[in-house]
Image (cartoon, grey):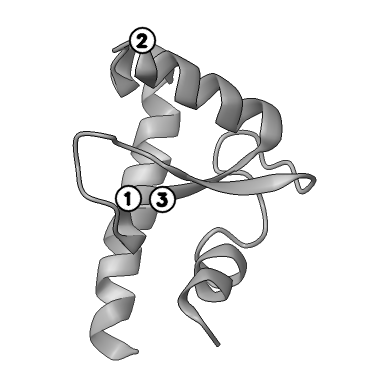
Amino acid sequence: MNELEYLVRDVWRGRSAISGDISKLELVIWDYSRPLTNQNVVLMNEREATEHESRTAARETLDQIYRKETLDTIDLKFKELNLRRLYR
């Protein structure tokens, strides 16, 4: 299994990290101030991805864009991904 398939299927479970949607999904850089790694991409639907990219391009912070619960959920996924790497 390649890394992209792993991220979409196993990490994000084929669902948007923001809404849980399963249609028209894209992997999006989460935090543009950090390098592109598998621990800095999030699966979103097309509308969410467009909004994320436009708002981060406008220099809004992740804290300004998303609720704390969303940020905590994504942070937890990144921590789980880091642990999985040790055993993969």
Kind of residue at disc 1: Asn
Residue corresponding to mark 2: 58
Instruction: Tell me which residue sits at (43%, 14%) in the image.
Output: 55
Report the front residue among 5 and 54. Answer: 54
Instruction: Tell me which residue sits at (48%, 17%) in the image.
Output: 54
Q: Position of residue 17 (x, y in %)?
A: 55, 43
Secondary structure category for the residue under label 3: strand
Instruction: Tell me which residue sits at (19%, 43%) in the image.
Output: 34
Mark 3 in CB contact with mark 1 (< 8 angstroms): yes
Q: Mark 3: give few (<14), some (14-19) or many (20+) Cα within 10 Å.
A: some
Residue corresponding to mark 3: 41
Kind of residue at disc 3: Val
Q: Position of residue 50 (x, y in %)?
A: 59, 25
Q: Earlier in the sequence, mark 3 or mark 2?
A: 3
Residue corresponding to mark 1: 40
Asked if residue 79 is positioned above or below residue 27 in the image, the reply reads below
Q: Position of residue 7 (x, y in %)?
A: 50, 66
Q: Residue furthest right?
A: 23
Kind of residue at disc 2: Ala
Q: Position of residue 86 (x, y in %)?
A: 23, 84
